Amino acid sequence: MLLLLAFGIGPMLYALYLAFTKHGSFVAFDNFIKVFGDFRFFPAVQHVAQFVAIWLASLVVLVVVLALIVHAVRVRWVSATTRFLYYIPGAFAGSASVMLWLFLLDPSVSPIAVLIKQLGFDSFITTVAQPNLPVIFTIIAFWAGAGGWIIIMYGALNTISSDVMEAARIDGAGPFKTAWYIQIPLMRKWIAYMVIVSLAAGSQLFVEPRVLSQASRGVVPKDYSLNQLAYQFAFGTQSDYNGSAAISILLLVVATGLAAIFVFRGGLFDRD
Amino acid sequence: MTATSLRVVPSAPAPARWLGRVLVIAVLVFFAVFFVLPLAWLLLAPTKSETALDGLHGELPFSFGSFGQLAENWNNLVQFQHGIIWTWLGNSVLYSGVALVLTILVTIPAGYALAMTTFKFRRLVLITTLMVMLIPNTALALPIFLELTTVHLVGTALAVILPFSFFPFGVYLAYIYFSTTMSHDLLDAARIDGAGELLVFTRIAMPLATPVIALVGFFNFVNNWNNYFLPFITQPGSRKMPVQVGLAELISNTPVFNPTNIASLTISLPQLALATLISVAPVLIVFLFSQRFLVSGLTAGATKG
């Protein structure tokens, strides 16, 4: 409980306080106005929005489809092995996954160099050019994170009673119709859960652009995402904790809002 | 309804079914390759020299180099800045380890209290826990940093350990576990026998909670080991970094990515690949050995019971 207060509520309140003050005096929305006015702010919002849009779309479609397929596989060990293989990259969450993809994206060493060159990129720098970044971050995040979601969806599919499935089959529904009319509607809560969590996490984009920025010597800018910008505010030449706090608050509002929608409307979590 | 009666049900004609099956297998295999291929390559990369890695002399990307080369890469990596990789790994173990113990000491009783007792504001605490659980930890990293700056903890081990021990998901898991599996009658029986609240918890609830303790421990450890943002901002100076942050720092010592580097001892790409492997090795090992248990845990985290 104490930790919840100290590291959950405490930082939020303190960041709120910092966001609305400067040198200890109340300045209302000045910090926010300054941040909004910063030339790097809206590009960062755009970058994050692009990434989140692509990532969410691919996550929802592919995770649901893959979970349905894996669930439909009758041979037990095939299904188990597939889930395991899909899940293993999850161990690489964080900077290790980005590191691995650094190699894969660099045509000079990549095992998939042929593929990258086919797409018209012949060096690491051209591969990580700005227009490609949302897709690249999506691939990295999907690689490391999708397996866990596939397993969760698989678990959700297992909770659908076999009576319902059999009834559908007897009524003559093929696998596609069963998936569309029965399985997917019954998975809706879980899909919503995944979307909300991923939306909140995606808006926080930091480690991927940070590491790529380091590796590409600035081709991937230091202030590509909002969290990077907040970091720049606090640790860059400005050392402006108030501005940094303002961005953090904006991001927190988004995350908390999403969490609230889910807790109060989602109904997945039993609050008794 | 038995399995035999199902076969009577008419299904799609044979060719269509075959086509469907082939398609399904193709999709499964494609994604298996997508998820596994990079890993396979990463396992092989450290056995090669820098020149063998680029394949300019016809080396195949998925070939094995040699153990001699692996040893050489290992030695070079370990000697880099007098074995700083060990310092980083040690930091990771320290931060994640102490946080793990603290997390379990805090989350299990908290979940127990929420599930088995009634107190004022219980509902409020529960909802707050749920909310904070859904907020990604990166969102709190900068605010936590700002808070720690004012209490002058930045740069100390506590600056990482304390936030790492804050794990609402664990409280939630413990809450779910206790509220679904623990019977009030059992606890009441113990109370009637004269056991105090503390005794009831330590002697009855704790031993029954072993599975959830393992689960909370697992998720907490994996999350913290892989956490980047928080230690990155609260641990300035390379001697205090955990290995995940250190890994990113290695890039600036890799000539391919940073040609301006003039340090005499640099990191080659195969060595960087080796470092990546080492940095996730503990988590990878835990993953490999706890698959079954983990799969049940992932689903339990979101379903009740």
Image (tube, coloured by chain):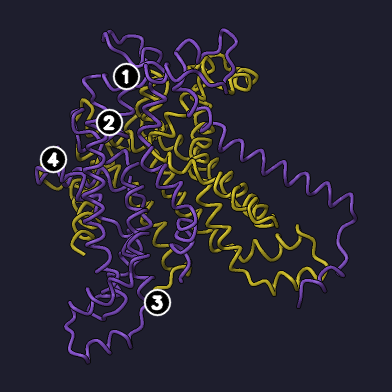
Chain colours: A yellow, B purple
Q: Describe residue A157's horizontal placement relative to residue A240 as left or right.
A: right
Mark 4 or mark 2: which is in front? 4
Check the image and report above or below for B9 versus A16.
Answer: below
Q: How far apart, in angstroms, are the residues tagged by discs 1 and 3?
A: 51 Å
Question: Looking at the picture, do discs 3 and 4 lie on one chain?
Answer: yes
Residue hosting label 3: B181
Q: Nearer the viewer, mark 1 or mark 4?
A: 1
Q: Residue at x 23, y 46 (%)?
A: B143
Q: Which residue is mark 4?
A: B156
Q: Nearer the viewer, mark 1 or mark 3?
A: 1
Q: Nearer the viewer, residue B150 or B301?
A: B301
Subunit that carries the residue with mark 4? B
In the drawing, what numbered circle is on residue A232?
2
Q: Which residue is mark 1?
A: B75
**How far, Cα to Cα, is label 2 from label 3?**
48 Å
Q: Chain of mark 1?
A: B
Disc 3 residue type (three-letter): Thr
